[in-house]
Amino acid sequence: MTASQKQDAQGKQAKLASAASAEVMIQLTKVNKWYSDFHVLKDIDLTVHKGERIVVCGPSGSGKSTLIRCINHLEEHQEGTIVVDGITLDKNLKNIDHIRTEVGMVFQSFNLFPHLTILENLTLGPIWTRKTPKAEAQATAMKYLERVKIPEQADKFPGQLSGGQQQRVAIARSLCMNPKIMLFDEPTSALDPEMIKEVLDVMVELADTGMTMIVVTHEMGFAKTIADRVIFMDEGDIVEENEPNEFFNNPQHKRTQLFLSQIL
Amino acid sequence: MGIVNATKTPARSAPLSEGSVLGWLRINLFSSVANTILTVVALYIIFLLVRGIWVWGIQEAVWSAESRRECFKISKEGACWAGVINWLDSIFYGRYPREEIWRINVGGLLLVLWMAPLWIPRVKGKVIIGLTTVFLYPFLAGYFFSGGEKGIFMQVMVSAAIVCLVAITIHAALGFFANSSLLQFLLRITGADKSSEKNQRNVLLGLLAAAFIGVFVWQMSWQFESVTWTKWGGLFLTFVISGIGIAFALPGGIILALGRRSKLPVIKVLSTTFIELFRSVPLITVLFMATTMFPLFMPDGFAINKLVQVIIAVCLFNACYMAEVVRAGLQAIPKGQEEGAYTIGLGYWGTMGLIIMPQALKVMIPNIVGSFIGILKDTTLVSIIGLFDILGMLRAISEDVFWRGLHHEPLLFGAALFFILCFAMSKYSRHLEAKLSTDHKD
Ligand SMILES: Nc1ncnc2c1ncn2[C@@H]1O[C@H](COP(=O)(O)OP(=O)(O)O)[C@@H](O)[C@H]1O
Ligand SMILES: [Mg+2]
């Protein structure tokens, strides 16, 4: 182990310790969800503290997307409670709208708005939901575009950008809302290999700023670099949960072992 | 070692290909003996047809006469366009008093003035201009066309419409010539552009109120002679009915389509029932129902005239058809767009208005314009229930004492008129489609 890695590991340990006492950002208690008769999420318990970075992995169809989509109520759960930033998700539409402004989300398919320029994509949320003056919103947008390293694309339309650039714009669009939590649902799965790195780099930088993040991904190198905790899901259960070194080097559960042997 | 090309290669003409006219002719029409014979025979048939039409319609035609009998006297073989020409005013305006026809023309010009800014590239706020066209212009036009005593409500709406029209015109001129907007201009000349936002709003509201009061006082002094709707007719009436139908169909259709997709069961069921009900009945049935059944449900002493009944029927009917067009357009937008909008905190209306609708409408343009063309043509059905729209007028010519039996010429004229209108609309829709899709190639 090199000195810097050691330092890293120590840092992580310290963070884990402090996380326990830090403010709780997301709390899921006994969450259950069905798609008609199909039980997708089974008694999910999960606590995420401020500044924590969680990586979720697991086979396709295990319910990873459904889990994080419940957190900003793109999907509705039927049983259990979800508390985000102190607000309980229920039928109250005001609460849901509020939580969505606090929780950013990045999708596998980018979901940029093709009829608006990059800059308009970024300023739309602040202008309409945060009532930010246009000039200020544009300044913020340019700041984040610089952060994701594509300020020169501001006046283009999404269709004119590469996949990697679009995904970075999508990240910047979420950041413009100044969210407290960022959710990522397989952000690099739709990208060509040479573009994956540019997106992961941006996400690593974001992690360094102390953002609370939940990332569904199979990029194990990335998970090792940034994750405080890795969660393995299978068939609607959280099967195993551990800090990354332990998780990858010493998986406990048979299903985890099988999964890791397949993807590594 | 390099290669040097010392002689300049001379340009040659392109080889015959499908792309050129000659090439196309050779490949498609004269590729073999049989093909050549077919082509020649077909050309001969076309020649006979065209010559027949030419001789009847133009060479031998009578352009000025006092009656059909006179037409026959001048030429037995030719068309009697004189009848159509004599009736031209009626074909366009029905039985509208001749000395008041200018009101219709002015009303039409006002519409052009109102909507022209929509086509001027540098003008901002086009959505608002479009909305006012739908919701304010009809009052102004309505008063121009029908005249008579103005009720207080009508006075208010007419004044509002005039203020709005003047504002739009100045705004468009400022946008076009000075790349500015009315708001900026007003704030600058009143010197309020540096003060607080609240102050600016007060200044603008004050100016608006002043303009409104001025116009209101002014319009009290003028009054048009009343022309009842029974005198309306011809192309004018067709335009009134189909114009209102077109203006209402899109907003009505959007509302119904959103209702049909709603998560609230009551709204969903109501919208769906409404849409399916109207779509499963022919328009002519709806028109008969509207004119015969509607009055039965009305409270005593509350009579609405036949024209209003017809317009309501046309509006509802077409809104239901448009709802299905809109629904198809909405389905073409990927679900991720909605989710993307939700995650940046846009609520339902924000998502629909800013993200989904603009994209869906773009996809729908050909179908929307197709529906508009349909509305224009279907409006002629009102002649069956006794309104003298353009078709009614064209048929009335043959019942005129002087022009008894003159059927072909008026109907051909009407067909040509409709063809021009509909063709222009569909050409414009192509143009719009092409323009919007190159704007942001995606
Ligand atoms: N809208 C839906 N309706 C019905 N079944 C769904 C829906 N969305 C996902 N599912 C099913 O739920 C399961 C979990 O899906 P998902 O959360 O997307 O898995 P993952 O993201 O882990 O691949 C899958 O079997 C999928 O087929
Ligand atoms: Mg998934």
Image: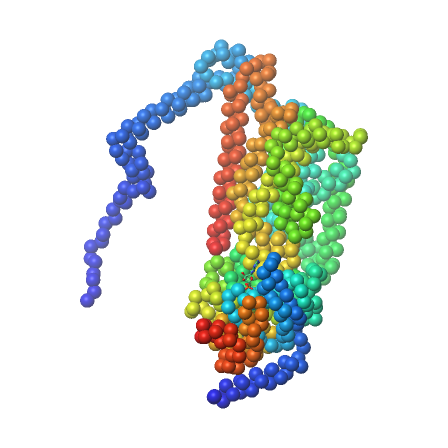
Point out residue B258 in the picture as x, y percentages from the top left corner.
Answer: 63, 48
Give the mark count: 0
The x and y percentages for residue A86 are 70, 71
Question: Is B330 or A66 nearer to us in this picture?
Answer: A66
Q: Quadrant of the C terminus of chain A?
A: bottom left
- Farthest residue to the bottom: give it: A3
Say which residue appears at 52% left-offset and 70% top-offset. Answer: A58
Image vertical order of residue B317 relative to residue B56, above or below: below
**Which residue is at a point 50% across and 39% down the rendered structure image?**
B426
Q: Nearer the viewer, residue A8 or A160?
A: A8
Residue shown at 75% from the left, 47% from the top: B210
Q: Residue furthest right?
A: B300
Residue depicted at 55% across the width and 67% down the height: A235
Figure check: B180 above or below B15:
below
Is B159 left or right of B244, judged from the image as shown?
right
The answer to whether residue B38 is visible is yes
Q: Position of residue B190 (x, y in %)?
A: 71, 55
Whole-percent x, y for residue A100 in the image: 64, 64
Quadrant for residue B60, please give it: top left
B382 or B264: nearer the viewer: B264
Q: Quadrant of ligand 1?
A: bottom right
Residue A168 visible in the picture: no
Q: Is residue B15 above or below residue B97?
A: below
State how the image is colored: rainbow
In this picture, residue A96 sits left or right of residue B409: right
* Nearest to the observer: residue B69 or residue B124: B69
